[in-house]
Amino acid sequence: MHEYSIVQSLLNSCEENAEQNNATKVIKVVVKIGVMSGVEPDLLQTAFDTFKEQTMCHDAEFIINIQPVVIKCNDCGEESTLKKNEYACLKCESVNIDILDGEEMYLMQLELE
């Protein structure tokens, strides 16, 4: 389960940010997970709950926002949010597309005390 190593890195980042801002505690952690990122939100939640105990995040609320795949068609220029795993332009049905969002995981927000 690579979610454990992801959470360890996330917790380290949270603590570094808290220390840089002279905070004693992390209140809220908000992440965005793309549906194509390979990260399982339920496993990430479990890993966060398991490993946060001895960190500044021990009482932190963990919010996961799921990011659907957003594409841009290279033929017609249309940007679309995909509802299914069919990687084609919703307007012209071209498969000549670029993926703009939905492949990554980002730390979006920290609330510190």
Image (cartoon, rainbow, N blue to C red):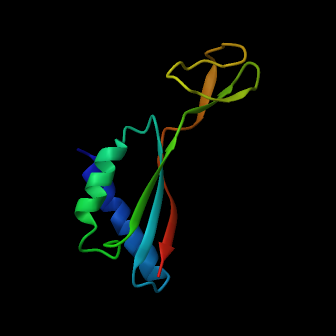
The front one of 21 and 90 is 90
Q: Which residue is found at the position 28% from the left and 60% from the top? A: 49
Judged from this view, the residue extending furthest toward the right is: 76
Q: Where residue 32 appears, x then y in whole percent?
A: 49, 50
Q: Where residue 37 appears, x then y in whole percent?
A: 42, 39
**99 sits left or right of 51 in the view:** right
Quarter of the image that includes the N terminus: top left
Asked which quadrant contains residue 90, the reply is top right
Q: Where residue 96 appears, x then y in whole percent?
A: 63, 18
Q: Is residue 58 above or below residue 102?
A: below
Q: Is residue 25 above or below residue 52?
A: below
Q: Which residue is found at the position 40% from the left and 85% from the top? A: 24
Asked which quadrant contains residue 53, the reply is bottom left
Q: Is residue 80 above or below residue 55?
A: above
* Numbered label tally: 0
Q: Which residue is found at the position 76% from the left and 26% from the top? A: 77
Q: Where residue 5 appears, x then y in whole percent?
A: 27, 54
Q: Is residue 113 above or below residue 103?
A: below
Q: Which residue is found at the position 34% from the left and 76% from the top? A: 56
Judged from this view, the residue extending furthest toward the top is: 93
The front one of 13 and 33 is 33
